[in-house]
Image (cartoon, rainbow, N blue to C red):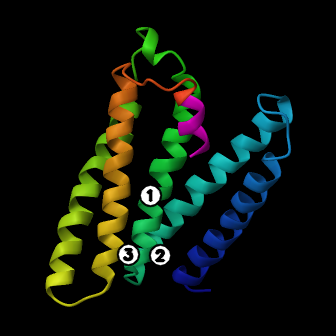
Amino acid sequence: MNPYSLFLALHIFFGSIGLFSGSLNLFFKKGGKRHLRVGRIFVFSMIATSIFALILSILKFNFFLLIIGIFTIYLVGTGQRYLFLKKLNQDEKPKLIDWILTGGMGVVGIVFMGWGIFLLFNEKSMGWALLLFGLIGLLSVRKDIENYNGKSKKRQYWLRAHIA
């Protein structure tokens, strides 16, 4: 088996586990033992899926897989971290990992926007996808920064971010 086929099989395997565990977890009591256990499986499998997506996107350049891999790491990472950031509006401070995830997405969002504009000027339709993902990423970063600074006006902001 060549390396690409191996990484593709692992990507599919962990992606299937992530899809199944994420769907299954919708039916468990939030905060219960099963929800937490299955949630850990979901997080691990989605991070693994994303890492394999990034590897695959480099081995045989696949732009869309690269974008999705980066976004999944950010979304799953921040979704997990928000479980520990329930009191940001009460002087709780985000950790370095929170700033790394958010800052990384900010940089990637700006790169996506610039790259998208470049592609559109060169009549490549993939530019629209980059613009859209860049915009969504930057809006999410803005919301994270607002939350990290304790300025969210929404009750249970952390739960919204966790689910998103």
Residue type for callout 1: Phe
Mark on residue 112?
A: none
Which quarter shows the N terminus? bottom right
Q: Label 1, on which residue?
A: 71
Q: Are marks 3 and 2 in contact (CB under 8 Å)?
A: yes
Q: Main secondary structure of the magenta part?
A: helix
**Which of the two discs, 1 and 3, labels the residue nearer the N terminus?**
3
Which sits in the foreground, 70 or 44? 70
Which sits in the foreground, 1 or 45? 45
Q: Residue at coordinates 35% horizontally, 66% vertically from top-left?
A: 132
Report how far apart the C-alphas of labels 3 and 2 lie in the structure. 5 Å
Alpha-carbon neighbours of circle 1 within 10 Å: few (<14), some, or many (≥20)?
A: many
Alpha-carbon neighbours of circle 3 within 10 Å: few (<14), some, or many (≥20)?
A: few
Report how far apart the C-alphas of labels 1 and 3 lie in the structure. 16 Å
Mark on residue 58?
A: 3
**Nearer to us: label 1 or label 3:** 1
- Eyeballing the image, is 79 above or below 63? above
Highlighted range, magenta? 158-164
